[in-house]
């Protein structure tokens, strides 16, 4: 290992084998729930650089696990990832659809747009006409989230005038759930009913409604294709219940120095923590400049793996490049410069750290910056 890597402020270990295992697990779940013969296909959301984990490394792993359908958000993400996907027959769907004037770029790069509005439909239809052959696309309808996709009124317009879809070969009709992580919420059922109604008005095609959490609502939500992202990357898709998926990331911070502070000493910016006793503190080389959220100030816990029985509280404000933890309770078995301490790991899982920071695993993952030494494993 070179010296820069060896002394990075933090080490982010990404287990590609766990991502593949999670993909196979989700495939298995839809297969069991739906029955072998009409099981939904499992796609993968790899937007936002595969939730910060590195799409160009994650996509080929998913492809080897059998995935043939990939979702990104932006055209730029689609252009970047297409060459990393080996099978030309695999699809890269771009959720935000074609911005004005970009239909040709989509077509030439082999990207399939998700068409979310009448404008985007017109854009794609015009290119199909100019080329003189049909072009594949996904149609998105809004079933009650009011984010992307055609409203019920727009779908009715498309029904009344089928020429609006001339030259568009609809390969998938999709929608997205607002509250899939809270199964008891009624909107999961009303969105399901509305999706059924709207998709029946559109050209016959495969259908897709569920992302990670939607898979766990049950087979009614699976249709022909499910589109998990978070669950592949170790975020619990069933909050409040034990996670069905394997954890994928471990984040270790390097100890820069330790110091002893007297009782009553204010620690860090704003004097946000006052030592209640003489304390041994360790300064770690990770801060909010690494995407480790400032909201864990005075709240998170770090774990020294050999002493996992003793959670080490984060004290004071998280700085840009560092944070402080209280290691007093380690006694004589203390830490020293160069030691690695888990900020996310087997004893402090991603979802718990996110929750301590007042956010969700999705945000914590996608925030983890480019400053760590990254290790990709495949156990
Ligand atoms: C992000 C996204 C997904 C994946 O969602 P997860 O909750 O991460 O599984 C699927 N579909 C759409 C439309 C999305 O925006």
Image: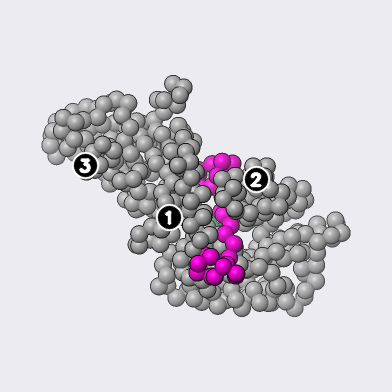
The span picked out in magenta is 30-58
Which residue lies under the disc numbered 2? Answer: 85
Which residue is located at x 56 percent, y 62 percent? 226
Q: Quadrant where the C terminus lies? A: top left
Q: Describe the element under mark 3 as helix, strand or loop.
A: loop
Distance Cα–Cα, label 2 vs label 3? 44 Å
Of labels 2 and 3, earlier in sequence is 2
Where is residue 335 drawn, in percent x and y?
24, 29
Assess mark 2: CB under 8 A from ligand 1? no
- Relative placement, left or right, of 81 versus 50 is right
- Relative placement, left or right, of 5 versus 352 is right
Distance Cα–Cα, label 3 vs label 1? 26 Å
- Residue 47 counted in the magenta span: yes
Where is residue 37 drawn, in percent x and y?
60, 69
- Residue 144 counted in the magenta span: no
Select label 3 or label 1 by which is in front: 1
Please name whichever residue, 266 or 140, is drawn nearer the observer in this view of the structure.
140
Please name whichever residue, 57 or 296, is drawn nearer the observer in this view of the structure.
57
């Amino acid at each position: 290992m070179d010296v820069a890597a060896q002394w990075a402020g933090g080490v982010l270990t990404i287990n590609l084998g766990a991502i593949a295992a999670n993909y196979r697990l989700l495939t298995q779940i839809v297969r069991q729930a739906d029955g072998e013969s009409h099981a939904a296909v499992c796609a993968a959301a790899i937007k936002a650089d595969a939730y910060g984990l590195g799409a160009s490394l994650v996509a080929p792993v998913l492809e080897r696990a059998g995935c043939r359908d990939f979702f990104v958000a932006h055209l730029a993400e689609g252009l970047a990832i297409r060459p990393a996907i080996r099978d030309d027959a695999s699809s890269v769907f771009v959720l935000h659809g074609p911005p004005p004037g970009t239909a040709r770029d989509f077509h030439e790069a082999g990207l399939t747009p998700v068409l979310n509005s009448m404008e985007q439909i017109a854009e794609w239809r015009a290119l199909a006409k100019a080329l003189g052959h049909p072009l594949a696309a996904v149609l998105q309808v809004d079933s009650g989230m009011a984010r992307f996709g055609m409203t019920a009124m727009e779908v009715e317009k498309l029904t009344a005038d089928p020429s609006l879809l001339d030259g568009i070969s609809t390969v998938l009709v999709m929608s997205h759930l607002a509250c899939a992580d809270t199964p008891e919420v009624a909107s999961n059922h009303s969105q399901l009913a509305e999706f059924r109604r709207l998709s029946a008005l559109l050209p016959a095609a495969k259908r897709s409604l569920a992302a990670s959490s939607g898979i766990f609502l049950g087979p009614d939500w699976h249709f022909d294709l499910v589109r998990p992202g978070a669950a592949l990357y170790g975020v619990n898709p069933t909050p409040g219940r034990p996670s069905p998926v394997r954890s994928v990331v471990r984040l270790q911070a390097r100890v820069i120095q330790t110091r002893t502070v007297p009782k009553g000493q204010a620690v860090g910016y704003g004097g946000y923590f006052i030592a209640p006793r003489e304390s041994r503190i360790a300064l770690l080389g990770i801060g909010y400049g690494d995407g480790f959220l400032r909201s864990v100030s005075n709240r998170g816990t770090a774990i020294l793996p050999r002493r996992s029985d003793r959670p080490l509280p984060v004290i004071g404000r998280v700085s840009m490049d560092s944070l402080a933890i209280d290691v007093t309770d380690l006694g004589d078995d203390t830490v020293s410069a160069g030691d690695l301490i888990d900020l996310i790991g087997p004893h402090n899982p991603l979802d718990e750290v996110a929750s301590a920071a007042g956010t969700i695993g999705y945000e914590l993952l996608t925030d983890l910056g480019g400053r760590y030494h990254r290790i990709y494993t495949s156990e």
